[in-house]
Image (tube, grey):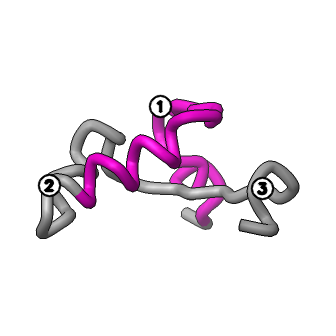
Amino acid sequence: LERHGKKSNIITSARSPEEWQALFPDPILGNSSLDRLAHSSYQILMEGESIRKQNRPN
């Protein structure tokens, strides 16, 4: 692919990456797709209360 190694993707999810494979109907395609995504990825896990709760009006 022309884009490979040149551009970035940002994927956000409320599910943990371990849960993603179950979302694919074909486990082989799911596993290979996730392997390509995770190969050179950085994972940022955010924990704690939502900032939306902190900023909403009372």
Instruction: Name the kind of residue labelled 1 in the image.
Output: Gly
Image coordinates of residue 16 in percent, x first then y, are: 33, 41
Instruction: Name the kind of residue labelled 2 in the image.
Output: Pro
Which secondary structure lies at badge 1?
A: loop
Magenta span includes 41: yes
Q: Which residues are magenta?
A: 29-56
Q: Earlier in the sequence, mark 3 or mark 1?
A: 3
Camera-side mark, 2 or 1: 2
Q: Residue at x 34, y 50 (%)?
A: 32
| Residue wearing tag 3 | 8
Q: Which mark is residue 48?
A: 1
Q: Earlier in the sequence, mark 2 or mark 1?
A: 2
Mark 2 residue crowding within 10 angstroms, few (<14) / some (14–19) / many (20+): few
Which secondary structure lies at badge 2?
A: helix
Q: Earlier in the sequence, mark 3 or mark 2?
A: 3
- From the viewer's perspective, is residue 1 above or below residue 54? below
Instruction: Name the kind of residue labelled 3 in the image.
Output: Ser
Q: Quadrant of the N terminus?
A: bottom right
Q: Which mark is residue 27?
A: 2
